[in-house]
Image (cartoon, rainbow, N blue to C red):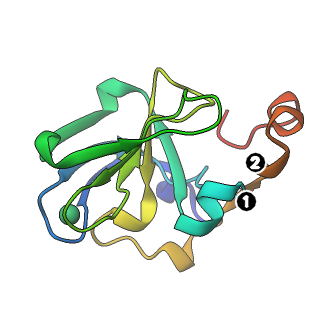
Amino acid sequence: MTTTEFKPQTFEGGCHCGRVRFRVTADLSRVTYCNCSMCAKKGFLHLIVPPEKFELLRGADALTAYRFNTGVAQHTFCSTCGIHPFYVPRSDPDKIDVNVRCLDGVDASALDVKEFDGRNWEHAMAGRVPWR
Ligand SMILES: [Zn+2]
């Protein structure tokens, strides 16, 4: 990849039905796949950004949150179409974790995706965390 691909860019994205839309500014150099029980089933591709880099354009009323285990993560999804465009992650509850698969015009298969061993969460967080 060239360095230009690591420059922050502004993307828009959303759920499948269009009720939820957002805008995010980030670079795609640290997109991460997690193998935990939740992310593996969703196929979530993580892009964690500070809240000031994220703007919910519409759909706050469409979001439902699912919680489990520690209850820290808020797995928000569109109550109409069921897609998970972003959520509040357990690792960084002060940030927003955007699903790269929900960004307009991004070919997820072309990205150099990092891996995170979320099945062994405590151990993985104590090691080298790809997005930090
Ligand atoms: Zn939807």
* 21 sits left or right of 37 in the view: left
Q: Is residue 100 above or below residue 22?
A: below
Residue in the foreground of this view, choosing between 120 and 55? 120
Q: Residue at x 42, y 67 (%)?
A: 101
Q: Amino acid at mark 1?
A: Asn
Q: Residue at x 84, y 37 (%)?
A: 128
Count neighbours of disc 2 (C-alpha within 10 A) and say few if under 14, some if 14 to 19, many if 20 or more.
some
Quadrant in which residue 76 is drawn:
top left
Determine whether the residue tagged by mark 2 lies in a helix, strand or loop: helix
Q: Residue at x 30, y 24 (%)?
A: 52
Whether label 2 touches label 1, CB < 8 Å: yes
Determine whether the residue tagged by mark 1 lies in a helix, strand or loop: loop
Quadrant in which residue 96 is drawn:
top left
Residue 33 picture location, percent across and down: 65, 59
Residue 91 picture location, percent across and down: 63, 30
Count neighbours of disc 1 (C-alpha within 10 A) and say few if under 14, some if 14 to 19, many if 20 or more.
some
Q: Earlier in the sequence, mark 2 or mark 1?
A: 1
Quadrant in which residue 102 is drawn:
bottom left
Mark 1 lies on residue = 35
Q: Amino acid at mark 2?
A: Gly
Point out which mark residue 64 bears: none
Is residue 33 something one can see in this rendering?
A: no
What is the distance, in whole Å, between disc 2 and disc 1 at their CAs?
5 Å
Is the CB of mark 1 within 8 Å of ligand 1?
A: no
Ligand 1 placement by image quarter: bottom left
Q: Is residue 17 above or below residue 3?
A: below
Is the CB of mark 2 within 8 Å of ligand 1?
A: no
Point out which mark residue 118 bears: 2
Q: Residue at x 60, y 58 (%)?
A: 39
The quadrant of the image that shows the C terminus is top right
